Image: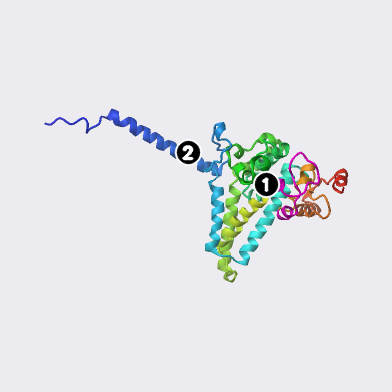
Amino acid sequence: MATPDPRVIASPERVAPSTGRAAKRASQVHARLLHTVRRWFDTSAMVERDEAQQDRIDWLRAAPFVAMHLACLGVLWVGVSPIALLVAAALYAVRMFALTGFYHRYFSHKTFRTSRVVQFAFAVIGAACVQRGPLWWAAHHRHHHRHADTALDPHSPGVHGFAWSHVGWFLTPRHFRTDLARVPDLAKYPELRWLDRYDIAVPVVLAAATYALGALLQQVAPQLHTSGGQLLVWGFFVSTVVLFHATVTINSLAHRYGRRRFATKDDSRNNLWLALLTFGEGWHNNHHYFPGSARQGFRWWEIDLTWYGLKLMAWLGLVHDLKPVPAWVRAKAGR
């Protein structure tokens, strides 16, 4: 019998280590993939990064944000209808008010008071904006006011550039986290903490609802020329992307373009066009000078739709103790 050539038949001792290493690598890749997917749904599933990576965009974690923009191209296939535009505009308006009136003026600055039920209701509507949860939003905004337009302000266009202040900063590991130490007054509510942890839950429900509405209208009112896909694309994706970019103009454009009524330590500006787009947030220099007021248009002609909405809610008994612009601030504003 011929003796087997040892160059042809490898021993188990030589094969096993390489096979084991390949299996280990595959297992590690699979675990990382699962963890990345989990981070899309559960913000508590953080990944430890070294300091050099803290301020680099995490593209895997940011994939849903990128996909949401690409989904807007769906308009080329689903077409458009008056109903689709109406739904998109209505969802923009309702959610913008939730952001400006509650995420900003209530959760971040406590410029009025309301019940726990109303607080939660508008936290849910705010979560539908796909701008993360109320605790995350308020914590970062409070940090912004403390360090506005310094190196510690992550979205200062003067320090970090326009693109980073507009869209880059919040896609980094450092800014995915919610610093609960900045919002102890809000962190005591378990329902708000749940919304913050599972910040994708409400947007998913809203996306499903827009599709279901479109599919229903296609069946019961075909003369409206809409469909599930059309309302999903226009009512959710297009409306949400426009809402996002309108909101973050206050980080980027409102710190570069406009007039400075008050000599604040930051670069905030008052800008009528941004105020119209964001329901009053464009009166940004006013706000940075005195952030404790529920009203940001300090003069009668400074249109502030959020203020008008809050006044209506106060008349209905839904909110109360709206903090006004103090007389001494009004006097300075009138000069």
SS at mark 1?
Answer: helix
Residue 290 visible in the displayed image? no
Place residue 251 in its image quadrant: top right
Identify the magenta region: 248-277
For mark 2, does the 10 Å Cα neighbourhood hold few (<14), some (14 to 19), or many (20 or more) residues? few
Cα–Cα span, label 2 and label 1: 34 Å
Answer whether labels 2 and 1 touch (C-beta < 8 Å).
no
Colouring scheme, one of rainbow, by chain, secondary structure, one colour: rainbow
Q: Looking at the picture, does residue 234 appear above or below residue 108?
A: below
Q: Position of residue 262 (x, y in %)?
A: 81, 44
How far across and how far down the image is residue 139, in percent? 68, 39
Disc on res. 186? none
**Amino acid beneath label 1:** Ser
Q: Residues within 10 Å of mark 1 (few under 14, many from 20)?
A: many
Instruction: Verify whether residue 250 appears in magenta.
Output: yes
Please check the rendered image and state whether residue 171 is part of the magenta-colored stretch, yes or no.
no
Label 1 sits on residue: 252
- Which residue is disc 2 drawn over? 32
Q: Is residue 167 above or below residue 226?
A: above
